[in-house]
């Protein structure tokens, strides 16, 4: 049994605090019926985000929609002008507003926030994405590959209206499936995971997606003895660890502060 | 208009301006380091502490609502000893008045917390939270009962010499009566209001949106309720009041001053923008001028009530 403390130590701690910055929409491209890719140009630089970190985005709700929306970084480019790329699925007011933004419009950002993915154990990682979970995992895949560490990324979506197949500068998944079979293979992304782990000899798993998918992934990985890091989702207000609004109960009933200590945790910290 | 126009005397505490950060929405202050210049604030009210650390309530703990949010954090906190050891030495460096907020499930717990905190010498005042809607015992149950409010206030008063602010809930059926009970028991001032009890339901799954089922509403949606609470309690007691509930800009601050608040607290708006409180401080002089005054102090309680104001006369 790998001790979660060992893994915890490998989880990267953000070196610099988050910044409050303004950004301008450089490009907003609809990539599926409900999904868009938002390219933002930052007016001031932010500490370089690492994969798994996120920003709280002010969607312009003012007094009516007070809370900023958490979005994972899908891509970051420091030069020539710092830019961030987000993947956004329309689910409610804020994401609808973001997907309707025109080039030149401004948004407020707070970040980078939280603790991203830690270094992989061993040499060959499997990245498993459910829905918009593909955003931080494409960033991770990019990071791993730039350090010449091998990885595969598989992505599952509900239906074709949610599918993001990647982009040249961001990368793309090695395999895509949908639950209704409307694009790619039919099924859930962690179907047959146990077989896949032993067949390809993955030494590390990273997962981001709905809770059920994470739990299933963690269970299979634990049985196979493969260390697994999961990125959790939670409603957030401050993103800074100060309101305790995002706290979830993890393994043994311990409090997990998703915005500050997460969103990435070792799966053994999350699931009993 | 210059900065001295914002100088505030709050029950003997000298504040550079009347803008405080509310309890629970700014954590222990340290988390905001680098995002807003805390030395520009009037002061900071720390997250409520209890004697032992508390784990808080089940998830989900927050839910956005129209013009506000519900929370059911349940006073998760690190406990008073960790506050004293880890937080106070670091947060004292910013050099603005700090207020501790205390919570507990017995009268004795409040007394112990007050004396323990006073002994640090790091605090300008203590806020007594008898109005949290999210704990089973010791929250709002004290604050809606005049006798319990008086008992808690007396025990805190007797166990510390710092100014004591009693934080109340607008959910009390006779809020001015409770405020009066706190006043008679020796409160130096009042803090109004805590979140308003509320809930949200998912119409599809038929389940509550909060893990704790019910929670407390905050943000602009509660401002009218908060203003009336300040107005009523100021008239009933004349005590200095920290007013808050839905403050979002400098105009809102002026409204609270006019209703009778001496200082104000910024809570949920900090989530919209962590630097909002200092922006409000910057905007405040212009808002004072717009209200036809030269200092914030001269606006306190100076609501112009129409001469023909009536209450449903026949
Ligand atoms: C760390 C993290 C990273 C995320 N990354 C992405 C991403 O890269 N792309 C993407 O499309 N989505 C992402 N999400 C989910 C995204 O934050 C929500 O879909 C979004 O907040 C919904 O806002 P809304 O105004 O459209 O919906 P509404 O339902 O109107 O939102 C109401 C409130 O609920 C909150 N909320 C609703 N759904 C969620 C949710 N699933 N998670 C957290 N808060 C929620 C909102 O933030 C808001 O406070 C991420 C969530 C977290 C916690
Ligand atoms: C997430 C959250 C946590 C809070 N925690 C506390 C607390 O610990 N003690 C307390 O006295 N009030 C607490 N409050 C209440 C606020 O201090 C404030 O009284 C209330 O939110 C109304 O002001 P606002 O509308 O400006 O937020 C909390 C409010 C929120 C939203
Ligand atoms: S969102 Fe406030 S503590 Fe995590």
Image (cartoon, coloured by chain):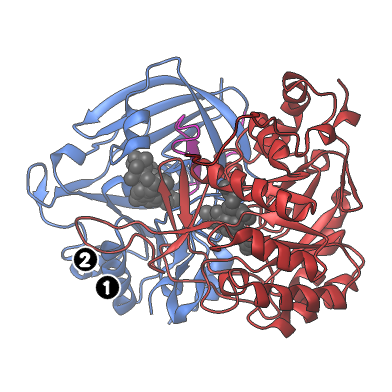
Disc 2 target residue: A193
Locate ligand 2 by image quadrant.
Answer: bottom right
- Does B192 sit above or below residue B106? above
Specify the quadrant of the image occupied by residue B278: top right
Where does the image place residue B226, in percent across and percent down from the top left? 59, 47
Where does the image place residue A148, in percent across and percent down from the top left? 44, 47
Image: magenta residue range: A45-66
- Does B115 sit above or below residue A209? below
Would residue A138 be visible to someone looking at this image? Answer: no
Q: Are marks 1 and 2 in contact (CB under 8 Å)?
A: yes
Which quadrant is the N terminus of chain B positioned in? Answer: top right
Where does the image place residue B254, in percent across and percent down from the top left? 70, 32
Q: Using the image, tell me which numbered label, if any, was put on residue A220.
A: 1
Q: Residue at x 81, y 43 (%)?
A: B42
- Residue A59 colored magenta? yes
Q: Residue at x 76, y 72 (%)?
A: B153
| Chain letter behind tag 2 | A
SS for callout 1:
helix
Q: Nearer the viewer, residue A11 or B129?
A: B129
Where does the image place residue A40, in percent across and percent down from the top left? 46, 25
Would residue B248 be visible to someone looking at this image? Answer: yes
Q: Nearer the viewer, residue B226 or A132?
A: B226
Give the farthest residue toward the top: A104
Residue under disc 1 on the same chain as residue under disc 2: yes
Pick whichever of labels 1 and 2 is earlier in the sequence.
Answer: 2
Specify the quadrant of the image occupied by residue A145: top left
Q: CA distance from mark 1 to mark 2?
A: 7 Å
Colour chosen for chain B:
red
Colour chosen for chain A:
blue
SS for callout 2:
helix
């Amino acid at each position: 049994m790998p001790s979660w403390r060992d893994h915890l130590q490998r989880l990267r701690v953000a070196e610099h605090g988050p910044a409050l910055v303004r950004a301008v929409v450089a490009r907003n491209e609809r990539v599926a019926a409900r999904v868009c890719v938002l390219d933002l140009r930052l007016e001031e630089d932010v500490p370089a985000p690492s994969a798994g970190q996120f920003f709280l985005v002010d969607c312009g709700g003012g007094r009516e929609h007070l809370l900023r929306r958490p979005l994972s970084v899908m891509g970051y480019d420091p030069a020539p002008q710092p830019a961030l790329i987000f993947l956004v699925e329309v689910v409610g007011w804020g994401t609808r507003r973001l997907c309707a933004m025109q080039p030149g419009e401004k948004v407020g950002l707070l970040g980078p926030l939280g603790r991203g993915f830690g270094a992989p154990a061993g040499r060959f990682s499997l990245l498993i994405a459910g829905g918009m979970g593909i955003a931080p995992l494409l960033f991770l895949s990019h990071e791993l590959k730039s350090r010449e560490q091998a990885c595969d990324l598989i992505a599952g979506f509900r239906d074709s209206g949610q599918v993001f197949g990647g982009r040249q500068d961001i990368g793309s998944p090695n395999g895509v499936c949908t639950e209704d079979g409307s694009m790619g293979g039919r099924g859930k992304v962690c179907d047959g995971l146990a077989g896949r782990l032993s067949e390809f000899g993955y030494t590390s798993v990273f997962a981001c997606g709905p809770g059920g998918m994470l739990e299933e992934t963690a269970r299979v990985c634990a049985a196979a003895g493969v260390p697994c890091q999961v990125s959790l989702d939670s409603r957030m207000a401050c993103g800074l660890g100060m309101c305790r609004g995002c706290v979830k109960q993890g393994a043994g009933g311990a409090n997990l502060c998703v915005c500050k200590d997460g969103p990435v945790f070792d799966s053994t910290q999350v699931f009993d | 208009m210059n900065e001295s126009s914002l100088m505030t005397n709050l029950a003997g505490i000298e504040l550079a301006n009347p803008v405080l950060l509310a309890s629970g929405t700014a954590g222990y202050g340290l988390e905001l380091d680098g995002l807003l210049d805390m030395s520009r604030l009037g002061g900071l009210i720390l997250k409520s502490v209890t004697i032992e650390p508390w784990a808080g309530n089940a998830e989900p703990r927050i839910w956005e609502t129209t013009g506000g949010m519900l929370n059911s954090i349940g006073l998760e906190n690190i406990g008073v000893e960790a506050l004293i050891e880890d937080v106070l030495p670091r947060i004292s460096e910013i050099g603005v008045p700090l207020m501790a907020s205390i919570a507990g499930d017995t009268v004795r717990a409040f007394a112990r917390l007050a004396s323990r905190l006073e002994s640090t010498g790091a605090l300008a005042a203590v806020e007594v939270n008898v109005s949290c809607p999210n704990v089973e015992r010791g929250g709002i149950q004290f604050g809606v009962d005049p006798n319990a409010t008086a008992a808690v206030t007396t025990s805190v008063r007797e166990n510390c010499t710092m100014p004591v602010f009693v934080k109340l809930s607008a959910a009390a059926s006779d809020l001015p009566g409770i405020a009066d009970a706190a006043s008679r028991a020796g409160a130096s001032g009042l803090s109004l209001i805590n979140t308003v009890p509320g809930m949200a339901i998912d119409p599809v799954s038929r389940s509550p949106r909060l893990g704790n089922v019910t929670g407390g509403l905050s943000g602009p949606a509660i401002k009218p309720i908060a203003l009336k609470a300040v107005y009523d309690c100021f008239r009933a007691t004349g005590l200095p009041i920290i007013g808050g509930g839905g403050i979002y800009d400098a105009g809102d601050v002026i409204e609270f001053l006019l209703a009778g608040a001496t200082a104000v607290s910024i809570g949920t708006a900090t989530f919209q923008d962590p630097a909002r409180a200092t922006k409000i401080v910057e905007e405040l002089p212009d808002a004072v001028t717009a209200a036809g005054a030269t200092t914030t102090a001269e606006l306190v309680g100076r609501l112009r009530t129409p001469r023909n104001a009536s209450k449903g006369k026949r």
